[in-house]
Amino acid sequence: MTSTFLGMPVYAPRGVGALRGDEPFPDAARTALGNGQLRRNLGHATRTIRGKRAAVVAEVPDWEELRLAGEAIKAATMARLPELLTQLEEQVTARGGTVHWARDATEANAIVLGLVRAAGADEVVKVKSMATQEIGLNEALAEGGVTAWETDLAELIVQLGDDKPSHILVPAIHRNRTEIRDIFRRTMPDVGELSDEPRDLAMAARAYLREKFLTARVAVSGANFAVAESGTLAVVESEGNGRMCLTLPQTLITVMGIEKVVPAWTDLEVFLQLLPRSSTGERMNPYTSLWTGVTPGDGPQDFHLVLLDNGRTAVLSDERGRSALHCIRCSACLNVCPVYERTGGHAYGSVYPGPIGAVLSPQLTGVEDNASLPYASSLCGACFDACPVRIDIPAMLVHLRARHVEERASRPVPSAEAVAMAAMAWVMAKPARFRGGERLMRLGRLLGRRADRITALPPPLSAWTASRDLPRPPGQTFREWWRTRPAAPVSPASDSAAPVSPAPAEEDR
């Protein structure tokens, strides 16, 4: 066993992986909102998943107690994470596995590539894994001459379509079946006149992947959970592709974020009730695969576990933000989010979209690298209500917004917003300046003379009018109106003096 040092908190490195987008969320969201087909696909899919989830959750009389238990287990795990990870390493090693520690995406990719080359393979089959997408493993393997084949149906659609995933659970949620048929016709040999019926599409994918399963010598997976007391890894899935990858190849490499550990088997019981209901709307997953080390003659004979940090210790160091590490990747928050339903996952720029991505990605990369994501929310609170482990995403969004403001304020060169606020503070500090500012505002009447409102301002004020209008300034200020207002008419009854009450005695005052 190695000597383990988690190190000081560091962020996920730039230039590798899929945690940073090419443009801020507002710009990407504006493009997505213009795609009517995308919105229809997302709306239909999220409504279906919400309905299924609501039905199976209603069957559980102690659902809220299960949520509280999940929250408590996760909080306790984060409080003793180094100890549990060391225990996990001990147990995996004792059962014939090998544990590797990766500080970031670059180290993790290098470890996996080295293991694949050591196995003499030039291709791998993959179980759906958010961690490997996060670190950009497929791209790193391709640069090293290794082809990675996604075996999850939705991930295969994304891969063959040269696309990016847009949902944690259903990566191809933004595609309808006609679009999927066209992708398969274009990329799969010998599919012929493939229809867009779901069964036909599934059968085509099955035939395409079967050869990969039977010939691959190396598989790469993620892990939903790892039990520290026994060194057991768990993957839950719905298609059976995971079971094929986890049992047929000679070598199995699992890349797992360090937050996925749980202390004991009894803790796993809680999450295996929460996860399937919150993710696929099922009472339990069709396939729950558990493996502990290496068993001679049964399954992979060479098992490697890569424990990935990649910014997680930085999240852990923030007392108010660390509960983002409680996430079990169920995607329930995405399916209830009004922002996600209209923009889709690509607008977030990260492999983690939706409400959880808006709080997790900025913490993994540093807030300034994903500064727009904490604002990608209406703070309606639906995500907290849906979260099976009660992550208070709205409170965390506000916290990250405050961190963003504080970090911008510490810059040596102030932002345009800071300059504007300072100028307004100076103007409003003296009555004479304020009156002068009011008079200058009348110039805005020229900009709003057509629509009786101001719809566009020059930069940098255009950032405001890009998403909202300004009222047209009035023709006179309140003070001017007050001075020139007509005198109130005097009624005849007011000519007689009103009776005056005597002043109260000193002791009554």
Image (cartoon, rainbow, N blue to C red):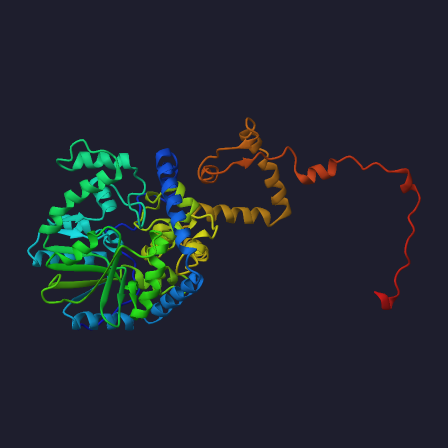
Q: State the image coordinates of residue 485 (x, y, percent, origin top left).
A: 75, 36
Instruction: Give how far across and how far down residue 219 sits, in percent.
Output: 15, 55
Q: Residue at x 18, y 44 (%)?
A: 206
As drawn, which residue projects farthest toward the left? 120
- Residue 473, percent from left and from top: 59, 35
**At which x and y percent is residue 454?**
53, 33
Relative to residue 206, is residue 387 depicted above or below?
below
- In the picture as drawn, the residue positioned furthest to the front comes out as 59
Residue 187 falls left or right of residue 485? left
Which quarter of the rendered picture does the C terminus lie within? bottom right
Vertical placement of residue 68 versus 22, above or below: below
Q: Quadrant of residue 83?
A: bottom left
Q: What residue occupies the far top of the structure in this picture?
A: 450
Question: In the figure, residue 1 lies in which quadrant?
Answer: bottom left
Residue closest to the eye, 371 or 77: 77
Say whether residue 11 is visible: yes
Q: Nearer the viewer, residue 126 or 477?
A: 126
